[in-house]
Image (cartoon, grey):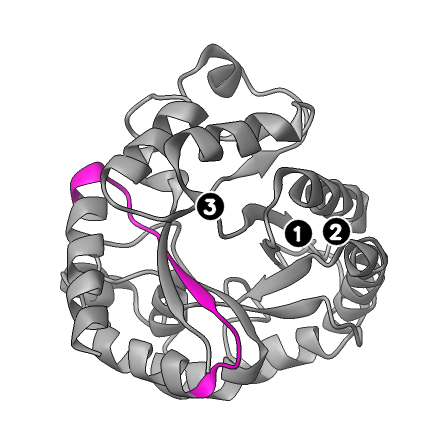
Amino acid sequence: MGNIHIGINLEFVRHDDKPFEWAVQKAAELGYSYVEPMVHLGRELLSEAGYFHSVSMFDDPLRVKRACEKAGVKLSGLSAHTPLCKPEVGVEYLKQAIRFAAECGAPVVNTDEGPKKKWTTEEEDFVLMRYTLKEAAQVAEPRAILIGLECHQQYSRQPDGLDRIYKLVKSPSIGINFDTGNAFLSGQDPYRWLRRVAKRLVHLHAKDISMRQSSAERGKVTGTPVGCACGDGVIDWAKVIDIVQNQCPRDIVFSVECGAIDQAERSIAHLDRLLEAH
């Protein structure tokens, strides 16, 4: 079975008005060995001014690689969420993210089906998603990049829906990026669902959910951008670790998704203690 490594999605600095390189260095200082940057197409004012952590895919991918090498961390993947249901957006976004990942050294590109068009039927949406994923897989396969499908939106909020998306295109490049917090908030049993996808898991979003958010939103939403610190919420991380260690055939990075630096600090302390105990 594979090993577990601890990483962090760079959204933990989203409210600190700092650039990408600063976020990578801060993650390293906190003790994380992997980072998951967010990438976007085109140019975005806050990122260009150095007030936001996202990286434009118009930039040189080596910018990302050099920042990680300087900080002494590795890339777990790229956060490249784009609506698979909207091929006019998703196809080129995802293909560019895959090429960018191959050059900067990120093994996984994470995405989901995204918000759908109001006027399309479910049957039409799955045709559109198949088109997007087929185009993306043809770019990913020769570059040995994995596409992590996340449980996050209208169809992937429950296990059968995520499996249906996964089965649209048969490709060794397509796997699952399981989000513990999204699975819980959608009203599912996250541990049963994780066992179901363990053999296909390529990346894991380590997202905890506070009791307050759980009481207010569980069963009413399909997911959330970030959670609380791992160990502060409802997720049983010892159980998550046990499932991944015993059932997943590959190494997996737990990419923490929280919304503040102090939460990131508590998250790695909690997860490190549990991994040591295992």
Mark 2 vs mark 3, CA separation in Å: 31 Å
Q: Are marks 2 and 1 in contact (CB under 8 Å)?
A: yes
| Callout 1 secondary element | strand
Label 3 amino acid? Lys
Closer to the observer: label 2 or label 3? 3
Q: Quadrant of the C terminus?
A: bottom left
Q: Residues within 10 Å of mark 2 (few under 14, many from 20)?
A: some
- For this rendering, which residue is in front, 98 or 258? 98
Q: Is residue 262 left or right of residue 111?
A: left
Q: Residues within 10 Å of mark 3 (few under 14, many from 20)?
A: many
- For this rendering, which residue is in front, 185 or 19? 19
What residue would you read off at disc 3?
Answer: 74
Mark 3 vs mark 1, CA separation in Å: 27 Å
Label 2 amino acid? Lys
Of mark 3 and mark 1, the one earlier in the sequence is 3
Q: Which mark is residue 83?
A: 1
Of mark 2 and mark 3, the one earlier in the sequence is 3
Closer to the observer: label 3 or label 1? 3
| Residue drawn at point x = 68 percent, y = 43 percent | 97
Residue 139: % across, % down: 82, 53
Q: Which mark is residue 86?
A: 2
Residue 15 occupies which quadrant of the picture? Answer: top left
| Callout 2 secondary element | loop
Magenta stretch, residue numbers: 247-262
Residue 70: % across, % down: 43, 28
| Residue drawn at point x = 78 percent, y = 72 percent | 171
